[in-house]
Image (tube, rainbow, N blue to C red):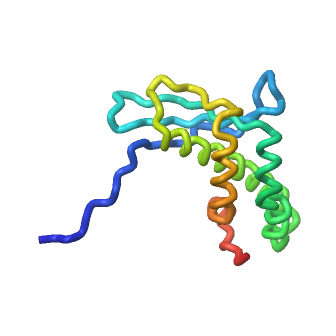
Amino acid sequence: MSTSSSPQIPRYRTTLFFGPEVHETHADILYCVFNVKKRSWKGGIQLVVEMAQPDIARFRRLLQFEAWLRDTLRHLPHEDYDEYFQRGEDLFLQFLCQAKLQLALNEGLRQETTLLSHDALSHELEQVIRRDGQSLKQDVLAELDIPPVED
């Protein structure tokens, strides 16, 4: 008899559809769109996750993200630096949106939900950033195919 257990299957499957994008009528709001599917749902939904620029700036400061990214990329050839830096910034925003989405999923999400507003879960997201910020940075590096940096 085997004592190993099956891996826990997540209740939701999420996939980044696109983003980050600037809101058409509110330049201080960025958003990402995710496809979200719960195992019990017949179909999935597209969910817009908004982030307000003041919150994004606060999270960047908390993690000293820009200085960290510049320092991390300093060894790259000059012709590659700007592309990697911009991609790192985009990944940071995507991961912020994904973390906010995860908070909403943990609270439970109805199938008809289509928007996670910029003013929702801001305090909770800050707590996650404070707790898991270093892992977020390492995720950015992994997506950029840059070896992890020891802090």
Q: Quadrant of the C terminus?
A: bottom right
Q: Nearer the viewer, residue 101 or 70?
A: 101
Residue 9 located left or right of residue 145: left
In the rendered image, residue 103, in percent from the top left (x then y), is placed at 56, 44
The answer to whether residue 86 is above or below residue 120 is below
Pick whichever, 121 or 43, lies toward us. Answer: 121
Work out whether 110 lies above or below 121.
above
Quadrant assignment, res 29 = top right
Residue 26 falls in image quadrant: top right
Left or right side of 102 for 42: left
Residue 92 spot, x, y in % from top left: 71, 52
The residue shown at (55%, 26%) is: 114
Q: x, y (%) of residue 64?
A: 81, 61
Q: Position of residue 130 (x, y in %)?
A: 69, 58
Looking at the image, residue 150 sits to the left or right of residue 40; the answer is: right
- Tally the marks: 0
145 and 123: which is toward the camera? 123
Query: For residue 5, what is the image quadrant?
Result: bottom left
**Residue at screen point 66% across, 30% down:** 117
- Please tell me which residue lies in front, 52 or 121: 121
Q: Residue furthest bottom?
A: 150
Q: Residue at horizontal 51%, vertical 35%?
A: 35
Quadrant (top left/top right/bottom left/bottom right) for the N terminus: bottom left
The residue at the far left in this view is 1
